Image (cartoon, helix red, strand yellow):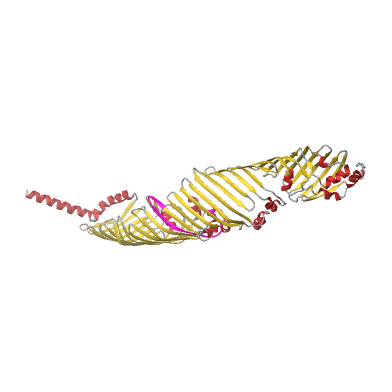
């Protein structure tokens, strides 16, 4: 038995020496070299060639080529019994792909690895992504770091994006330094500094991927400092761009709870530079600041701003919002919108949303001390608004089920408008509402109407608006009768029933020379600026005036006793030109015109009037301006009538007669 045991021990010893001789000798290395190459190739899925492979007891020398473009060199000493090593390495990678990452530009790293699996120190320097990299790392038990520093200098951002298979969003360089005192699986102590030097953003690439149209030559730079203490990261951040600036003085992030708290300040020094983003030209500057709190359970965000002279506050808690804008200056708003200062006043808004996602809540809006710069409005828009045009506005609204329902009122020094039941469909973009318009003193519209007015008017109606359609209708009790109208897209139609001409003349501040109950219809195409006006009456009568006195003296007929049972007035409107004809018939008279013309732009009027009184015929020509027409009549015929003569003299002539003074009551 003893001899057998000795034999077995001797055999094991001889086998061990033989195996170690094969493993750690040149012949042995040659035998296992193909096995090592295939094993590495299988693990890395790369073509690997061991150019040098010398494994000896206590030292190693290895040189490998990967995919014919990259290499790794390794040499040094090791101890199998102590599981320790002291190695130098030299790597160079280029045009090689690992998983989804492709290294195109040359990356190399040289250094030493010393220690064992429980305490390993790696010191290395190299070049990567057109910059430099330095590592001084102390790895404990394969999972922890202690007193380790990693430094990246002037790394090309474009190269990093290419490495990560991302579009070239920017072109610039950054520096990174991580000074890690202690890193475990559950905590990190140390500091990280990151600086992105002034970098040009690729507006075309950003627009293509994110549909954000940045201005060309937009630049950005970033400065971040972070202190890592256990599970907490405390940092400061500054982002400077040619468009805006973002700064945080203290940001706290807890790794375990994934919660974040931070202050912030966001400054936009010049809104004009944001035109490609906003799609409109804006002017001015603004600053915003507040706090952000986030956790997996939700978020809490506040915002404060003095934009446009206001006191603006916003508070968002998860899906709810409370916001207020107090005393925003309308003059500043006009300037911000790159508009002239057409109005002044203070705008205030309040919003309370129980759900931002569902748009459910309430809104209020107020405008106080509104004042229109009428001189500027009149100049820029060719209007004739009166001076001292003031206004206030009030709106209260609720939001629910994709609908905004509101009551609104606009009170001005000219008129008051009330919208008692506005409904706006946010999904279909349709609006409907009733309205009430009241003007207590029409004389305030004199400058707009370009003539004297008096009296008052009240209109009530409805508005319906969709994406490509508009309908407005209304009615009013006016001139002792009933007015109804409807505007549908570009077509305007109106009817006037049982209106008293005397009241119409009184509103227009015209002499009350004729009484009548009239009916009228208007059809007008706003787009093509053409339409018709038709008016009729069956109870017209002249009031006593100088013309009636003269005709009484000439013809012996008192026209104030004539009742015109058939009055017709027809007009065609084509842009600024109105052509009209009229016919008035009583028992003893007929007044008729066939070729009346009024130019609305120049206010010129021209018409020939034929007058028949019993068997006698007279003519008159009206010309000049609407507000002061000149009348020429056949004065010789009038004289013959006055003397009892006929009117058939072919040599009758016309002249400017004193009779025109009797007709000034017949203004248009």
Front residue of 322 and 47 = 322
Tell me if residue 87 can be seen. Answer: no
What residue is shown at x 30% (from left), y 55% (from top)?
186
In screen coordinates, is 261 left or right of 335?
left
Front residue of 128 and 67 = 128
Counting labels gives 0
Q: x and y percent of residue 27 in the render?
A: 24, 54
Q: x and y percent of residue 222 in the render?
A: 44, 61
User: Is 4 above or below relative to 189?
Assistant: above
Q: x and y percent of residue 658 in the render?
A: 86, 50
What residue is shown at x 50% (from left), y 43% (from top)?
402
User: Is 459 above or below relative to 180?
Assistant: above
Front residue of 1 and 297 = 297
Q: x and y percent of residue 244 in the render?
A: 49, 59
Image-quadrant location for residue 95: bottom left
Within the magenta stretch, is there residue 277?
yes
In screen coordinates, is 496 left or right of 88?
right
User: Is 71 above or below relative to 564?
Assistant: below
Image-quadrant location for residue 368: bottom right
Within the magenta stretch, is there residue 213?
no
Tell me if residue 265 can be seen. Answer: yes
Looking at the rendering, the stretch of residues picked out in magenta corresponds to: 275-299
In screen coordinates, is 160 left or right of 436?
left
Front residue of 601 and 633 = 633
């Amino acid at each position: 038995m003893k001899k057998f045991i000795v034999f077995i021990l001797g055999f094991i010893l001889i086998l061990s020496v033989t195996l170690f001789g094969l493993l750690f000798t040149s012949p042995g290395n040659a035998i296992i070299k193909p096995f090592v190459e295939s094993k590495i190739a299988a693990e890395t899925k790369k073509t690997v060639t061991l150019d040098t492979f010398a494994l000896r007891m206590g030292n190693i020398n290895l040189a490998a080529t990967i995919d014919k473009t990259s290499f790794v060199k390794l040499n040094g000493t090791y101890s199998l019994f102590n599981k320790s090593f002291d190695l130098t390495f030299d790597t160079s990678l280029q045009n090689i792909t690992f998983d989804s990452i492709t290294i195109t530009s040359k990356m190399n790293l040289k250094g030493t690895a010393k220690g064992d699996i429980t305490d390993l120190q790696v010191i290395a320097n190299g070049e990567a992504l057109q910059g430099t990299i330095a590592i001084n790392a102390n790895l404990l038990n394969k999972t922890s770091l202690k007193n380790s520093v990693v430094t990246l200098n002037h790394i090309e951002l474009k190269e990093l994006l290419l490495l990560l298979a991302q579009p070239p969003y920017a072109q610039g360089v950054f520096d990174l330094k991580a000074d890690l005192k202690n890193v475990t699986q559950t905590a990190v102590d140390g500091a990280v500094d990151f600086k992105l030097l002034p970098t040009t953003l690729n507006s075309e690439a950003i627009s293509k991927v994110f549909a954000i149209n940045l201005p060309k030559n937009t630049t950005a730079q970033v400065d971040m400092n972070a202190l890592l203490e256990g599970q907490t990261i405390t940092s400061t951040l500054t982002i400077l761009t040619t468009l805006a600036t973002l700064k945080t003085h203290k940001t706290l992030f807890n790794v375990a709870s994934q919660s974040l708290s931070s202050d912030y300040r966001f400054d936009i020094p010049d809104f004009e530079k944001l035109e490609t983003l906003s799609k409109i030209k804006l002017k001015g500057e603004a600053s915003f600041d507040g706090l952000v709190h986030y956790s997996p359970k939700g978020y809490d965000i506040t915002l404060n701003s003095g934009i446009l002279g206001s006191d603006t506050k916003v508070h968002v808690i998860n899906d709810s919002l409370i916001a207020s804008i107090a005393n925003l200056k309308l003059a500043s708003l006009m300037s911000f919108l790159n508009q002239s200062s057409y109005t002044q006043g203070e705008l205030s808004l309040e919003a309370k949303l129980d759900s931002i996602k569902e748009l459910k809540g309430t809104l209020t809006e107020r405008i106080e001390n509104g004042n229109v710069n009428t001189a500027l409005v009149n100049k820029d828009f060719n209007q004739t608004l009166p001076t001292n045009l003031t206004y206030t506005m009030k709106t209260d609204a609720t939001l629910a089920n994709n609908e905004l329902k509101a009551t609104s009122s606009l009170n001005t020094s000219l008129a008051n408008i009330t919208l008692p039941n506005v409904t706006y469909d946010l999904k279909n973009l349709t609006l409907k509402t009733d309205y009430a318009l009241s003007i207590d003193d029409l004389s305030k519209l004199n400058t707009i109407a370009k003539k004297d007015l008096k009296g008052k008017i009240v209109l009530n109606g409805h508005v319906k608006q969709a994406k490509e359609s508009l309908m407005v209708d209304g009615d009013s009790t006016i001139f002792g009768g009933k007015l109804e109208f409807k505007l549908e897209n570009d077509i305007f139609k109106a009817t006037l029933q049982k209106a008293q001409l005397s009241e119409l003349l009184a509103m227009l501040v015209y002499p009350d020379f004729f009484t009548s109950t009239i009916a009228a219809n208007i059809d007008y195409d706003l787009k093509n600026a053409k339409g018709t006006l038709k008016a009729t009456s069956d109870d017209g009568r002249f009031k006593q005036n100088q013309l009636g006195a003269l005709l009484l003296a000439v013809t012996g007929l008192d026209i104030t006793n004539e009742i015109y049972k058939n009055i017709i007035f027809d007009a065609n409107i084509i842009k600024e030109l109105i052509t009209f004809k009229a016919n008035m018939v009583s028992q003893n008279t007929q007044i008729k015109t066939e070729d009346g013309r009024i130019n609305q732009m120049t206010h010129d009027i021209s018409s020939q009037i034929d007058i028949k009184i019993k068997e006698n015929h007279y003519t008159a020509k009206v010309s000049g301006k609407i507000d002061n027409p000149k009348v020429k009549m056949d004065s010789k015929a009038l004289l013959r009538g006055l003397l009892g003569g006929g009117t058939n003299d072919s040599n009758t002539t016309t002249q400017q007669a004193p009779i025109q003074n009797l007709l000034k009551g017949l203004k248009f």
